[in-house]
Amino acid sequence: MKPSLSGRPDAAKSPGRHWGHPLAREIDRLLAAGSTPVLDDLVRRFEAIAIDRALAFTGGNRSHAARLLGMGRNTIARKIHELGMDNRQTTQSGDTL
């Protein structure tokens, strides 16, 4: 059996040991509520959280955050705008927090 990044073979398969369990509960909640489209909603929320955390990690440097997330700086700028995250403070380098 191939080990996961954590070194535990079952970690990737066991949602209760990772963030998959709360995600599964949220999917169940959205489905039960009749929300649609569930995947689009979750992807937007995931992207917003990932971008927010990368910006916090880089002190608001969009270019660095984009590199860490595996996207270009134009892509992160577009996603920040699309997700309504563009009302942030600007750093000395001109990047936005």
Image: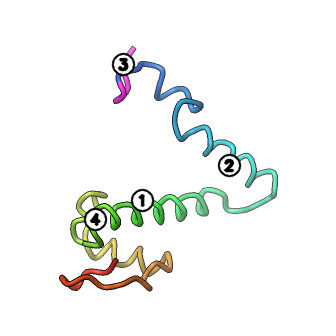
Q: Label 3 is placed on what type of residue? A: Lys
- C-alpha span from label 1 to label 2: 18 Å
> CA gap, disc 2 to disc 4?
28 Å
Number of other residues with Cα within 10 Å of mark 3, as a class: few under 14, some 14 to 19, many 20 or more: few
Q: Amino acid at mark 2?
A: Ile
Q: Is tag 3's residue or tag 2's residue first in the polypeptide sequence?
A: 3
Q: Is residue 3 magenta?
A: yes
> Which residue lies under the disc numbered 4?
65
**First of labels 2, 4 by sequence position:** 2
Indicate which disc, 3 or 4, sits on the residue closer to the N terminus: 3
Q: Residue furthest top?
A: 1
Q: Which residues are magenta?
A: 1-6
Helix, strand or loop at mark 3: loop
Determine crowd level at label 4: few under 14, some 14-19, many 20+ residues with C-alpha closer than 10 A. many
4 or 1: tag closer to the N-terminus: 1
Residue 50 has which mark? 1
Which numbered disc, 1 or 2, marks the residue that appears first in the sequence? Answer: 2
Q: Which residue is mark 2?
A: 27
> Residues under labels 3 and 2: Cα distance?
27 Å
Asked which quadrant contains residue 71, the reply is bottom left
Q: Position of residue 36 (x, y in %)?
A: 72, 62
Q: Which residue is denoted by mark 3 in the rendering?
A: 2
* Secondary structure mostly seen in the magenta stretch: loop
Horizontal side, residue 33 vs residue 70: left or right: right
Closer to us: mark 1 or mark 2? Answer: 1
| Numbered marks: total | 4
Q: Alpha carbon of mark 3 to alpha carbon of mark 4: how far? A: 31 Å
Circle nearer the viewer, 2 or 4: 4
The secondary element bearing badge 4 is classed as helix
Task: Name the kind of residue labelled 1 in the image.
Answer: Ala
Cα separation between marks 4 and 1: 9 Å
Instruction: Locate residue 18, reporting x and y percent.
Output: 51, 35
